[in-house]
Amino acid sequence: MWGESEINPEGELKVSFGYQWNTSPHKFSESSDIPSGLNIPRTSNIPRTSSFSGLSGAALSANTTLANTNICNGLLGEEILPTWDSPKSFRRVPSSPSISRLDVLCSSLQSNFSNLSCSPSSETEDYDSFLSKSISVPSRSDSFLNVMELQVAGGAAGEDRVQAVCSEEHGWLFCGIYDGFNGRDAADFLAGTFYETFMFHFNLWNSKKDLQYNLEDDNVTSLPRSDDLFRQGVSDSLQQALSQTESDYLYMVEQEMEERPDLVSVGSCVLIVLIHEDDLYTLNLGDSRAVLATYGEGSGNEGLKGVQLTESHNVDNEIERARLVSEHPDDPMTIVAEKVKGKLKVTRAFGVGYLKKRILNDALMGILRVRNLISPPYVSTQPFMNVHRISKSDQYVIVASDGLFDFISNEEVVKLVHSYITRNPSGDPAMFLVEQLVTRAADYAGLSWEELMNIPPGRRRKYHDDVTIEEIAVSSAWTYTKVSLETTSDSEYCKPR
């Protein structure tokens, strides 16, 4: 595993990471926190094409989970995720057996996923044999993922998973927050497969576009990357990747459910932010949020406002509630006790197969099974997709799981960050927000923050949710000179400053 992380005896994993993007050359900052012993080559020949100028992230768990996921016989947890999980800063992804096995897991690379077994042999040669027989899987030399031009950072907190991918080849920043529930398996699956699935669909679109355009004009080999066609390609690829990843995950759940029937109830919210040039793409399922800090009328902090770029997909949203009821006119028990079928607050989510397929619901026993599953699916996988054109008024984007917004509103969160960065240009705004959340959760419970942090994971979920935050600067005014990347113990973590 790259970098350092800490797992306490209760199974809690905490992480903070950060990254600075220099102006002009598209390269690592000399001040980046790179642990000794890692040879991170600098690249300066690729021009910078994205608007973001800084990134920081922090996470804190409230739930206790197993150290590794068991889906696909532990393959995701043991073979893939450690190479993506919890580095202290961005790392180049090496060409390794783990990444090759990711190709096998991602069924978007196959024309027929039914040939894939979820109980593969532990021998690497069996994988190599499988790959050689599956002609629809690109070889490593033809890979849609150029590992020499990719930087990855990520982490985990309870059932939350977070990743950030900086692609020099495509000139974009990809950030994903996967807020798992009823277990971590769905969030693990997303963290392990979604980006490569997206890249497969994007490069497939790009190849078809180039072919079509060349047929129309042999003198032109590619289209401008900032035009409407490119935006549509990115948007379509993100949505296709989500649909494909959902299908792959539910297929695996069906294969595993005899031994692990609990998998049918495991799901995740999804929040993706991708920045390319001056375009900011957001895709979401569930109630995680992306909030843009931008200046409206007025000046200074008073003119700064928070604009939510995502939708909140839960039963508290009257539009979502009305949609859900209208889609199930023959079921008077669609919403019970302010939850979908009495089970789930979110109305759109990844996984949670027992609310989508009868066969998966039937795998559950007793009170866990949903009674009268009249007209599934009850939870939608149709995402909200938005493309925002970054302007000079835009400052930064707060990307976070819903645990943050349980205590801090959109407007307040952008003003807190603005105030903090103004006072601490070398600080870590994401970590600062986690500290604010813990302080407020403690105050609400009538505890000191030390008392709250000494409550073990699992029991602490009574006071706050898992929380994961990424803060992305899109204005050159907020380019951080140093970012705190330390993972600390409970006694030190989130101490108010």
Image (cartoon, helix red, strand yellow):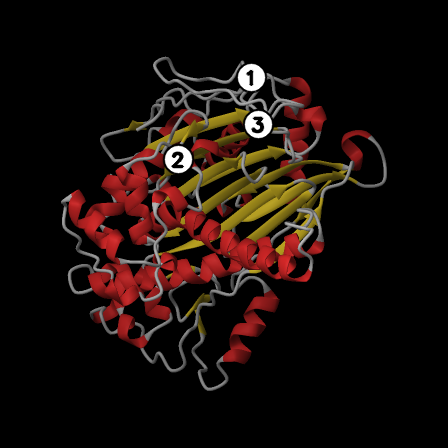
The numbered mark, 2 or 1, whose residue comes first in the sequence reads 2
From the viewer's side, name the closer residue of 137 and 429: 137
Secondary structure of the residue carrying numbered label 1: loop
Q: Which image quarter holds the N terminus?
A: top left
Instruction: Measuring from the top left, give residue 290's x and y in whole percent.
Output: 59, 46
Give the left or right position of residue 301, taking residue 161 as reference. right
- Three-letter code, disc 1: Lys
Q: Is residue 392 above or below residue 267?
A: above
Residue 1: mark? none
**Image position, residue 267 (x, y; %):** 37, 57
Mark found first going from the N terminus, 3 or 2 = 2
Q: Could you give the CA–CA distance between mark 1 and mark 3, rounded to whole angstroms?
A: 11 Å
Amino acid beneath label 2: Gly
In the rendered structure, the answer to whether residue 148 lies left or right of residue 52 reads: left
Give how far across and how far down residue 40 sits, in percent.
Answer: 43, 20
Q: Is residue 311 visible?
A: no
| Residue at figure coordinates x 48%, y 56% from the top left | 201
Quadrant of image for the C terminus? top right
Q: Residues within 10 Å of mark 2 (few under 14, many from 20)?
A: many
Q: Which residue is mark 1?
A: 482
> Which residue is most to the right?
298
Label located before the other in sequence (1 or 3): 3
In this figure, which residue is indicated by the disc labeled 2? 155
The local crowd at label 3, few if under 14, some if 14 to 19, many if 20 or more residues have their Cα within 10 Å, is: many
Instruction: Determine whether the residue tagged by mark 2 lies in a helix, strand or loop.
Output: strand
Disc 3 marks which residue?
Answer: 429
Of marks 3 and 2, the one in the foreground: 2
Nearer the observer, 217 or 13: 217
Residue drawn at point x = 60 percent, y = 67 percent: 318
